[in-house]
């Protein structure tokens, strides 16, 4: 069985010529942008994982902190391993190649990462020399598999065809391609539609992987996966819970899991970690939606964009005193908010190309009027507020930045690792 090619319109019709109508038929030339899949064999994906020499950042994704180590995802390629024992001079020590990687989590010196359709486990007892110790094949179902291999990307090409326009079709479909008429669709698209007893790390608000109560949790686009970690080297899948559609992020807090989607925030009761149950739901207009909480309130950012299919750019403050009935308290307009973090009375918010904002959240009704600092010399995608240190870790498309935010009104830049174009 062959996998279909997915195609999205990005150009208007270039040449339109009617040759005339005869017996209620017509023909016209239409130009389509066609996205054809790029395949990789399953064998090559599964043979490539392993340690390499350190490399520069090119397309940084998510970040993770574990002790004095910092891990930065290189989108779809692997993980940069950085020794952050000296925050003023972090040292890039190695690159862990993991094809298709986007997320990570650590528990008891075991690194869990996705590799396209697989879940891989590395022993990081020696962080500079990770050792692949386990692989769960075909764990993640969103990746398309076919006789040609795994669809890992799409290649855009243009094609002009002489089409029968009498039916007014918006697209055509064959065995291995779908094409949309850009002029009829009226739009364009930018992209084609992841507390414990032993040592665990800390991820950002954009994470799809998390560790809580000696269990490993993963969300994909629709489900919550629960893995037992009684034997950390070989996580055991305990349950799969359907959540909803367009699930994006997961954030643990005490006895609850907060799951962000494009249409709302789900709150799961995690008192029994092997069997989380849906407790409450806060719905909002469609938009991308990471979420964090301080236990009393949840802070949800909503942003627009082609991928998110929304039109809002704001931060919602949600009262979760009764987690079964979350209640909107107030919304604050932002530029294009993304990841966020809370620590004490302070809220750290990534506002994309508008930089990083720091707010006093001690009075949630006055957050907008209590902006303490605004760093505009960086682009911010996600942030981690390290507990007990005063430091914050920030990642964005232009690189990694680290601040001493002991005084949130006057954060001090400690170090920066810039992206190399």
Image (cartoon, grey):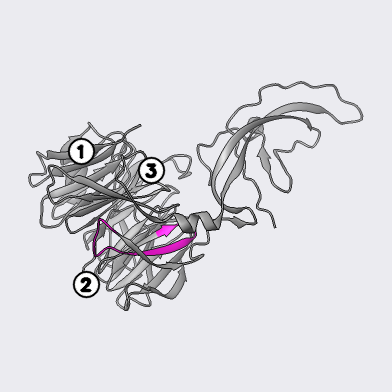
Q: Position of residue 75 (x, y in %)?
A: 40, 46
Q: Nearer the viewer, residue 196 or 79?
A: 79
- In the image, residue 26 above or below residue 98: above
Identify the residue shown where x is 47% and y is 57%: 47
Stretch in magenta = 114-129
Give yes or no for residue 244 being in the magenta stretch: no
Report the mark closest to the observer, 2 or 3: 2
Dot 2 crowding, Cα within 10 Å, few <14, some 14–19, many 20+: few
Picture quarter containing residue 50? bottom left
Name the residue tied to disc 2.
198
Q: Position of residue 10 (x, y in %)?
A: 57, 32
Dot 1 crowding, Cα within 10 Å, few <14, some 14–19, many 20+: some
Q: Secondary structure at mark 1?
A: strand
* Image-based side of 165 in relation to 332, left or right: right
- In the image, residue 404 above or below residue 374: below
**Pointers 3 and 1 in contact (CB under 8 A)?**
no
Identify the residue shown where x is 45% and y is 43%: 310
The residue positioned farthest toward the right in the image shown = 23
Quadrant, the C terminus: top left
Q: Secondary structure at mark 2?
A: loop
Marks 3/1: CA distance?
26 Å
Q: Secondary structure at mark 3?
A: loop
Kindly tell me whether residue 298 is visible in this rendering.
no
* Image-based side of 331 in relation to 23, left or right: left
Name the residue tied to disc 3.
303
């Amino acid at each position: 069985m062959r996998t279909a090619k997915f195609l999205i319109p990005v150009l208007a019709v270039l040449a339109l010529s009617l040759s005339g109508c005869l017996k209620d038929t017509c023909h016209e030339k239409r130009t389509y942008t066609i996205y054809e899949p790029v395949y990789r064999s399953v064998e090559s994906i599964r043979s490539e994982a392993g340690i390499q020499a350190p490399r520069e950042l090119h397309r940084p994704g998510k970040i993770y902190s574990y002790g004095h180590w910092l891990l930065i995802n290189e989108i779809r390629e692997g993980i940069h391993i950085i020794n952050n024992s000296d925050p003023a001079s972090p040292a890039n020590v190695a690159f862990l190649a993991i094809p298709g990687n986007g997320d990570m989590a650590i528990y008891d010196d075991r690194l869990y990462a996705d590799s396209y359709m697989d879940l891989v486990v590395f022993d990081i007892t020696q962080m500079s020399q990770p050792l692949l110790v386990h692989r769960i094949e075909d764990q993640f179902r969103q990746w398309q598999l076919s006789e040609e291999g795994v669809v890992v990307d799409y290649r855009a090409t243009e094609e002009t065809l002489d089409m029968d326009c009498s039916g007014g079709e918006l697209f055509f479909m064959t065995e291995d391609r779908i094409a949309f008429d850009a002029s009829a669709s009226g739009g364009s698209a930018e992209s084609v539609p992841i507390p414990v007893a032993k040592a665990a790390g800390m991820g950002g608000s954009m994470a799809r992987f998390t560790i809580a109560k000696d269990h490993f949790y993963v969300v994909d686009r629709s489900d919550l996966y629960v893995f037992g970690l009684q034997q950390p080297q070989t996580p055991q899948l305990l349950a799969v819970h359907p959540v909803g559609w367009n699930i994006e992020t997961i954030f643990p807090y005490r006895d609850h899991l907060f799951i962000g989607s494009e249409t709302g925030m789900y709150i799961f009761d995690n008192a029994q970690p092997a069997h989380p149950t849906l407790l409450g739901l806060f719905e909002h207009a469609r938009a991308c939606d990471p979420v964090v909480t301080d236990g009393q309130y949840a802070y949800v950012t909503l942003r627009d964009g082609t991928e998110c299919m929304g039109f809002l750019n704001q931060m919602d403050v949600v009262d979760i005193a009764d987690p079964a009935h979350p209640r909107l308290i107030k919304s604050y307009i932002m530029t294009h908010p993304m990841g966020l973090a809370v620590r004490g009375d302070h809220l750290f918010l990534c506002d994309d190309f508008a930089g990083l904002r720091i707010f006093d959240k001690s009075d949630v009704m006055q957050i907008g009027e209590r902006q303490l600092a605004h760093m505009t010399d960086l682009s911010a995608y996600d942030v981690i507020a390290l507990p007990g240190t005063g430091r914050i870790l920030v990642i964005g498309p232009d690189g990694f930045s680290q601040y001493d935010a002991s005084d949130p009104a006057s954060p001090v830049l400690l170090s920066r690792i810039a992206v190399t174009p």
